[in-house]
């Protein structure tokens, strides 16, 4: 979905998100967080799947509908360390969404980007065309074998980490996948950043619905994240 949001588009950094109220009235009270996939001109682009009433209403909105209310950009996004030459992106399903703009920006600055992307099925692969346009290589894995390797994306990601030199790993997707990728990156001695997907009722740090346990105590994904250094997060056992 493309949204006309000039102020948001002008200031967004890769990895930040918006908070949307998709309807008025009592049916949908809380806003919903959506990662910003890309921003250009006066528009921001989000990717979503229909999972409930809110996203169903979004899908039914006609072009030009002005009923949605947007707050953003929110949160802290990805960080690109100085001097990086090669970055590995590992995505799972809609976890590809917050990495689109970062991939474009790194590639535009001469950073080689390699991508390992996974999904349950071929139809659930997200943003593949964007990555294939900017990345040096894109490896695909699907749980049912309908495209690419048959299995989890951790397999091609582990192979890339063993065979090539990377300066940083960026990952977003299901939490077990991110945990596995963080461990693989740590074993390879490569810094890793993760974007944690949490329910964010307020989006501004007030409701504490999105807390994350870290080595420094509890932090809020909406204002302290959603991007964290993987070494900072204390994973649930």
Image (tube, rainbow, N blue to C red):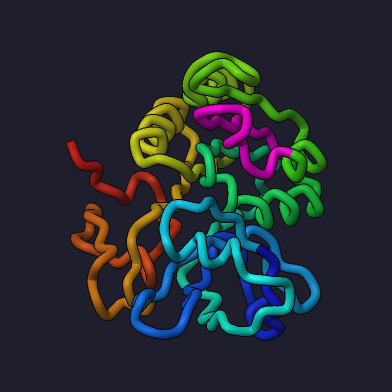
Residue 211 in the figure: left or right of residue 227: left
Q: Which residues are magenta?
A: 113-128
Position in image of residue 176 (x %, y %): 34, 35
- Residue drawn 25% across and 42% down? 235
* Count of all numbered marks drawn on residues in the image: 0
Along the line of sight, which residue is nearer the eye, 110 or 49?
A: 49
Q: Is residue 54 magenta?
A: no
From what the image shows, is residue 230 above or below residue 159? below
Give coordinates of residue 167: x percent, y percent. Answer: 59, 39
Residue at 38% from the left image edge and 74% from the top image edge? 28
Question: On the picture, is 133 further left or further right than 20?
Answer: right
Residue 116 is left or right of residue 229, and the answer is right
When asked about the image quadrant of residue 113, the answer is top right
Magenta stretch contains residue 122: yes
Residue 142 image point, x, y percent: 55, 23
Q: Is residue 212 visible?
A: yes
Nearer to the camera, 93 or 232: 93
The residue that appears at 66% across and 25% down in the rendered structure is 139
Indicate the quadrant containing the N terminus: top left, top right, bottom left or bottom right: bottom right
Specify whether residue 163 is in view: no
Q: Is residue 182 positioned above or below 4 on the image? A: above
- Residue 154 placed where, x, y %? 47, 24
For the C terminus, the image quarter is: top left
In the picture shown, does residue 235 fall above or below 151?
below
Q: Residue at x 50, y 42 (%)?
A: 171
């Amino acid at each position: 979905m493309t949204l006309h949001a000039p102020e948001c588009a002008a200031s967004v950094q890769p990895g930040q998100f918006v908070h949307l109220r998709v309807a008025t009235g009592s049916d949908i009270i809380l806003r919903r967080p959506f990662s910003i996939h890309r921003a250009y001109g006066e528009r921001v682009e989000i990717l979503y799947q229909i999972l409930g009433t809110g996203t169903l209403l979004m899908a039914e909105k006609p072009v030009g509908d002005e009923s949605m209310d947007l707050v953003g950009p929110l949160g802290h996004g990805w960080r690109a360390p100085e001097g990086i030459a090669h970055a590995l992106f590992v995505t799972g399903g809609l976890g590809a969404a917050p990495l689109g703009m970062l991939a474009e920006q790194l590639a535009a600055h001469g950073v080689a980007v390699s991508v390992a992307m996974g999904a349950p099925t071929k139809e659930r692969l997200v943003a593949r065309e964007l990555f294939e346009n900017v990345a040096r290589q894109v490896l695909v894995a699907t749980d049912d074998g309908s495209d690419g390797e048959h299995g989890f994306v951790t397999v091609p990601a582990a192979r890339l980490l063993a065979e090539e030199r990377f300066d940083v790993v960026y990952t977003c997707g299901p939490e077990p996948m991110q945990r596995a990728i963080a461990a693989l990156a740590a074993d390879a001695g490569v810094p890793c950043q993760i974007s944690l997907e949490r329910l964010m009722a307020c989006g501004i740090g007030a409701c504490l619905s999105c807390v994350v346990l870290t080595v420094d105590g509890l932090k809020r994904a909406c204002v302290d994240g959603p991007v964290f250094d993987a070494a900072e997060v204390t994973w649930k056992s």
